[in-house]
Image: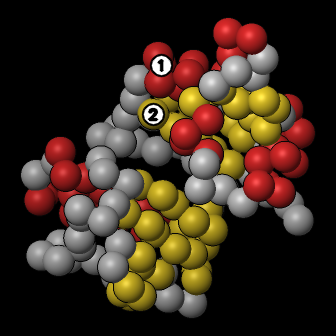
Amino acid sequence: MNIHVLATDLSTRMLKTAQAGIYPKEKVRDLPSLMIKRYFLKGEREWQNYVKVKDQLKQYIQFQRLNLMEPFSFADPFDCIFCRNVMIYFDKEKQTNLVNRFYECLHPGGVLIIGHSESLTGIPHKFRYLKPSIYKKEL
């Protein structure tokens, strides 16, 4: 499969944390054990309660600072956009603008996944509702 992940955040500090790929073990406890063995290294000594994402997985991820209120500069459309628990901080006008910009950034059939505390209710958009927090760009 041809997989590319663009991981974004406004905070450069959070991007550095994500790039390091080191997490407390409890953050991965709900993943299947096979997945943990395949994609994570277990910490030793002072790092025994941590895991680190293996380079074989990190090679598919590009980290980039992104301010959602500024114009996007993405060259290619996405199959899926995750924007979880961010829109709650914006007013309806900014939410509407952002959701419609996401729509334009998706391939036909692409999916937008938002946080469970968020909804597109009351926001004019072209997405088709699939289920709570999941919306699809029609073909």
User: Is 64 on the left or on the right of 98, as rendered?
Assistant: right
- Report the residue marked by disc 1: 12
- Report the residue marked by disc 2: 9
Q: Which residue is drawn at 67% across and 9% down?
A: 46
Whether residue 75 is visible to the viewer of this picture, yes or no, is no
User: Is 50 on the left or on the right of 16, as rendered?
Assistant: right
Q: How many numbered circles are shown?
A: 2
Nearest to the observer: residue 130 or residue 79? 130
**Crowding at label 2, few (<14), some or many (≥20) Cα neighbours within 10 Å?**
some
Residue 100 screen position, x and y as percent: 33, 66
Q: Name the secondary structure under disc 2.
A: strand
Q: Which residue is drawn at 41% across and 78% down?
A: 135
Q: Which residue is drawn at 66% across and 56% down?
A: 31
The correct choice, above or below, for 11 with respect to 136 in the image is above
**Crowding at label 1, few (<14), some or many (≥20) Cα neighbours within 10 Å?**
some
Quarter occupied by residue 99? bottom left
Q: Name the secondary structure under disc 1.
A: helix
Type of the residue with mark 1: Thr
Q: Do the residues labelled 2 and 1 touch (CB within 8 Å)?
A: yes
Q: Residue at x 23, y 70 (%)?
A: 119
Type of the residue with mark 2: Asp
The correct choice, above or below, for 130 with respect to 72 in the image is below
User: Is 25 on the left or on the right of 127, as rendered?
Assistant: right
Whether residue 41 is visible to the viewer of this picture, yes or no, is yes
The correct choice, above or below, for 110 with respect to 5 in the image is below
Residue 98 screen position, x and y as percent: 31, 56
Residue 28 screen position, x and y as percent: 61, 45
Quarter occupied by residue 139? bottom right
User: Is 8 on the left or on the right of 45, as rendered?
Assistant: left
The correct choice, above or below, for 44 with respect to 75 in the image is above
